Image (cartoon, coloured by chain):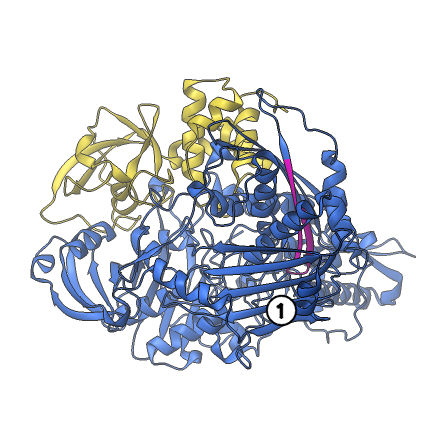
Amino acid sequence: MNAITNPSRRGLLATVSSALGAFTFGFHAPLVKSAAAQGSAGVPEINVWVVVRPGDTVVIRIARSEMGQGTLTGLAQLVAEELECDWSKVTTEYPTPGQNLARNRAWGNMSTGGSRGIRDSHDYVRKGGAAARMMLVQAAANGWGVAAGECSAANSMITHGPSGRSTSFGAVAAAAARLTPPTDIPLKDPKNWKIAGKSIARLDTAEKLNGSQVYGMDLRLPGMLNAAIHACPVFGGKISAIDSKAAEAMPGVKHVLRVGDNAVAVVADTWWRAKKALDAVKITWDEGQHASASSAAFAEVIKAGLDAPEAAVGNRNGDARAALVGAAKRIEAVYGYPHQNHACMEVMNATALWTPERCEVWTPTQNGEAALAATAEAAGLPPARCEVHKIHLGGGFGRRGAVHDWVRQAVTIAKQIPGTPMKLIWSREEDMLQGRFHPVTMCKLQGGLDAQGNLVGLHMRISGQSIVAGIFPQNIRDGRDPVAFQGLNARGGEADIGYTIPNLLIDHAMRNPHVPPGFWRGVNLNQNAIYLECFMDELAHAAGKDPLAFRRALMGNHPRHLAVLNAVAERVGWGNTAAPINGQPVFRGLAQTHGFGSYVAACAEVSVSDTGDLKVHRIVAATDCGHAVNPQQIAMQVEGSFVYGLSAALHSECTVKNGRIEQANFDTYQVLRMDEMPKVETIILQSGGFWGGVGEPTIAVAAPAVLNAIFAATGKRVRDLPLKHADLRRA
Amino acid sequence: MPTKPPLGSGITEWQVGAEVAKLNVNGRVVDIQVEEDTPLLWVLREQLGMTGTKYGCGVAQCGACTVHVDGAALRACAMPVSAFNEGQKIVTIEGLSPNSSHPIQQAWLALDVPQCGFCQSGMIMAASALLAANPKPTEAQIREEMTNICRCGTYNRVIAGIQRAAGIGTSG
């Protein structure tokens, strides 16, 4: 694919120079005066999703962003399935956010988060493919003077059954583009899929094997300058004074600039020179009211929320408090989950070119439209005079979606050097200190058992940070964050609790620190699943029951939750003793949840040595996402989810001291590496009838499955993450 | 003959006041002109226009910048260019093989190893150096030697890819 293609191809030409593997971009501003209905390379589009070139190459437009999750290939499979085209001739391109704006959002929502890429757009992209096929068939039928109903399409060819005549998509594409689009567009039964539903290879692998894939960081425009930036490490702090004399005298330095009231940038000919000079700028900060904030102090605020009288209710039935009072046995536990950084491998970056008439940005973004809005606002120009070119992302995980702080910075810098393209790259340290962090929360769980060990009441009090309050405060209603209860909601949504509990209360006391929150892959499902699934294990133990049997007794009304749990239990042979590995006994732990529309479960197999060393040997995972568009890609998302989830469970945390994040690079913000990676076996259930996301839900079962296995191994409950702080020697 | 990279093919500009040095990169001797403390990574990316080698951390933690120097894997982000001379053969992802034909690249293609792909240049360079030194590594050796970070989580497919390239089956 060509990730930087502009559908109009007017202006931005990506050319690859063979010399030393370098590349340049022909650059002419303004790029797109008006988004026309022209297709790639001047070929008219059949519709907004499909362009067929004369040589039968099929260009499928992808509105969502590819950041490794495979959505680009999956969406193309869905379009191609209905189009009946030759998959070997499929290529893809991104329409730009500016074109989407100019064409009244013809491509719909460009946001790529919440595991939404396929589940929210499968219907209209399949209809786009089907409508294009119908128009191609009609055009061929018109040419032959026969009824379209006598013609069929397959493998980019159209055949007239009675006469046996055939023609190619490319031969009739121009005529098809002139037809009126159909309004009644039937779709295939997924049972009849030939391209979708198959584990076919990704479309974007080859470029990633030889260094030719262009990421935002790699972009180069003629005459471009490079910028490094340092914002006040204390959130809310401002610049008090800058001494830039030494920096300005350093080689290659062009400008030392203020970026808003809280950041300093050095613009130089190369990034390395900009970075070095930035380190030589003496900045005095006014650190503001949070200068002495700390994680420890904030933990006290959250703890108080665990018993606060006021809390927003997320799920309630019966009378949990009364049930707890009347219970034969009462169990209580408090869990906690720290701040996390997304730590995308590619740090935040954007290239911007500002003139008084127009502003353009090239950036890796999960949400091109939000990037365009940020560009327009920072540029002081209407969105129609701005454009964003989406560049392939070196990881997103939620960091590059809702908040485009780095785009605003890039435009603010570019605005101070009109007419000069400027690439802003954050250092890793900047990326770590200026994150949008996984929210910090705690949860107090109280459960009541009757004399037979049945769960009669459960109260979950979550206390802590709200992502929505930090990013979309307008969506907070009566103090309630609707996303805070992911995986704990009553039935009927995309993230429902999988147990029927006669008396249940789940509520949230919102407590927001000054650290800015973000949507971190898995969002609130991550900690909610740890809290609920670890406590279910605690309750089972207190009831003297097997953790699987205890759960099953509560899941009769939740067959899909139960099906994934049963699938992992059967695969591992739950109930049988696991075979020892390297002389160490192996113990198992379970977890299940529902989020982003999919049902997921995991069984972890771990050993803990006499000295407390943990080894996660294998995880068996099950996902029911309804319709599976590319099973191999789903398996890759499940495997990757365990890396993300186990990184957080075992190693990662961001702590605050003196108002700022303490972990500035991978030496202190540790993540999972290959030596600790368990084997992963993925079971994909395709129960059909619904479309669930797969990029995120499995993360949430990684930690609780491991924590429950650790309890089985050691008798110890670890209730605070990361695990590196825990002493796992047997109790 | 030293080859002066042509301006306009990815070279920003010859840097005034900087020292001239020679490097042997992907089989060609090239002049470079930078401050001597400039990390090799940034010389490759900004002066030679070879952006396949990635900046990930700047402190030799993540391995996204891995290149070969005389056949051994090296993290280019934390090594000043002054540490190299034209007698040392530097190979980047762009020069690993013609047409992505190295067995590691072929195995990566067959198994669809990359996700976002940003770490994969470094991953492929580390894996190819590992196989050059140890053509039949055990799984334990792969896990021990391969310390590059991938946040998408391709580790198990990286292990399988190395085993495939080495012509050994996956274990258990």
Position of residue A645 in the picture relative to residue A53 (left or right): left
- Which is nearer the eye, A179 or B19? B19
Relative to residue B17, is residue B110 depicted above or below? above
Give how far across and how far down residue A673 sits, in percent.
Answer: 46, 37
Tell me the SS state at disc 1. loop
Q: Where residue A226 appears, x then y in whole percent?
A: 26, 58
Q: Nearer the viewer, residue A150 or B105?
A: B105
Q: Is residue A306 visible?
A: yes
- The correct choice, above or below, for B52 with respect to B13 in the image is above
Residue A517 seen anywhere in this rendered image of the structure? no
Chain A tint as drawn: blue
Please report the bounds of the magenta region as a residue range: A588-601
Q: Position of residue A476 (x, y in %)?
A: 53, 78
User: Given the image, on which type of amino acid does mark 1 rest?
Assistant: Val
Please tell me how crowded label 1 is: few (under 14), some (14-19), or many (20+) other residues with Cα within 10 Å: many
* Disc 1: which residue: A48
As drawn, the chain in yellow is B
Look at the magenta stretch and give its main secondary structure.
strand
Q: Position of residue B62 (x, y in %)?
A: 37, 40
* Magenta run includes residue A599: yes
Q: In this rendering, is residue B161 above or below A403?
A: above
Quadrant of the image occupied by residue A274? bottom left
- Tell me the chain of label 1: A
Which of the 4 quarters of the picture holds residue B148?
top left
